[in-house]
Image (cartoon, rainbow, N blue to C red):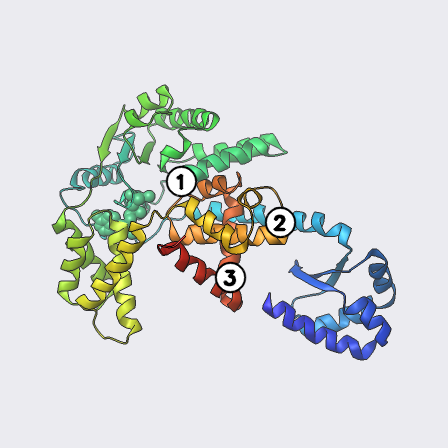
Amino acid sequence: MDSLLSNWNEVLKGMSKLVTAVSYDLYIETLEPIKIDNNKLILLASTISNKNQLMRLHKDKLLTEVKKYFENVDDLVILDPSEKEAFLEDIKHAEEVLEAKQIFNDKNKLNEKYTFESFVVGKSNQFVYAACRSVAENPGKKYNPLFIYGGVGLGKTHLLHAIGNYVRKTRKNLKILYVTSEQFTNDYIQALKADKKENANKAFRDKYRDIDILMVDDIQFIANKNSTQEEFFHTFNDLYQLDKQIVITSDKHPRNMETLEERLRSRFTGGLIQDIQKPDFETRLAILQKKVEIERYNVEPDVLIYLAENIDTNIRELEGSLNKVVSLSSLIGKQKATKEEAEEALKDIALSQSQNLTVDRIIDIVCKYYNVKRDDLISKKKNKEIVDPRQICMYIITELLDVPLMNIGTALGGRDHTTVIHARDKIASSIKTNKNLKTDIDDLIAMIKSDEM
Ligand code: ADP
Ligand code: MG
């Protein structure tokens, strides 16, 4: 946005030399550059008659000037105020569709770092590890479905990717599909919504039926969606009957998933159900050592012991604390991280845990900060005073909490997860250039993490 404005200022300067002062004041200076879309610079005129006059008298000059300063622009779109909303809505829709497609592809990618080699085996996960290896070596043969359950950050996603990466290397002809249950839901909804139903259904079936291994991560999120469960049931049966491998993860045992349909529960329990537990001290230490080795971190050995002793909740946090220690020590220019930084890092972590850091708290603080009502924030309103804080809210939640995008959307007035992604990415890129916004967000995060309010 900053470069948009600074280029626009150059255009203004240029135009001021080409048109009369009256024209400049009336038609040019009153224009507001909105954005660049598809190589077109979108401008907002202050009234319809200004727009018409401008088009009639100065459009060519303006375009020539614009092209001088905007490399990728080859045309102008001038809107009057009555056209603005509809136009932005269209662009937004097009962007969301595009994003949905991109996410679709990104999420299908396997993370190459998550392999069996990089997975540390200990008492807490040896059985689940063995089951996953067996599935990877003989998909569809032994444990089908394989159902893995356990708390957050204990390695479920890592193991799914490890299966995928292993099969991809050893059995190139097999088709693997890894999806989160959010993605499954989304694909299914898209298929329902599509104008050309048949095509959409076919696309859905091609994606989910024409595969050898289906891995669905965090299935708990479809357990309260009836029609999605139904579709999943059919997908499951079709694949299962063809001896295709199915691997599922969840935060709970199927019997404890209250809203899970009975017939799915019985399918899930028909295979192997394996839990993954919190790692013991030795495993935690080994995980840290492995991470140091992979990332080539330079840390004193007692740092690892200290972290492994103090963080026993989950492995994501354990890894996070190590990253924190390393970044603290490089911040102060140390070659090697010592226990001093480890203690510092843990203080921060303890603090963020002691606060009830929740979506609710974040919404509250953002509302107060920008002086907007909570009802407005979660409403359908689209004015900038509301949209900006709403998007900032979404961004901060994704930064601070590990909550599924879909749930963030729900908390903020039943919005789609693509909207959350859009907001997150937009703010993330804005703060790179917009210092004020960055300061606002830093302030907000500090407030959210502090004891006050
Ligand atoms: P979950 O899906 O259960 O919430 P993840 O698979 O995302 O957890 O794991 C969280 C982080 O911890 C990941 O970076 C993962 O690589 C790491 N991790 C988990 N278990 C292990 C392990 N046994 N060995 C090495 N890294 C692990
Ligand atoms: Mg996971």
Question: Residue drawn 50% across and 37% down?
Answer: 187
Expressed as whole percent of the image width and height from the top left, the position of residue 98 reads 57, 49
Element class at badge 2: helix
Expressed as whole percent of the image width and height from the top left, the position of residue 217 reads 36, 39
Task: State the CA–CA distance, disc 3 to disc 2.
Answer: 17 Å
Residue 114 can be seen in this image: no
**Of pointers 3 and 2, the one earlier in the residue sequence:** 2
Using the rendered view, name the quadrant where residue 155 is placed: top left
User: Of 152 and 274, which appears nearest the observer?
Assistant: 152
Q: Which residue is mark 1?
A: 180
**Of pointers 2 and 1, the one earlier in the residue sequence:** 2
Q: Which residue is mark 3?
A: 429
Task: State the CA–CA distance, disc 2 to disc 1.
Answer: 25 Å
User: Of 229 and 234, which appears nearest the observer?
Assistant: 229
User: Of 437 and 184, which appears nearest the observer?
Assistant: 437
User: Disc number at residue 450?
Assistant: none
Amino acid bearing label 3: Ser
Amino acid bearing label 1: Thr
Amino acid bearing label 2: Lys
Q: Which residue is mark 2?
A: 92
Left or right position of 26 against 275: right
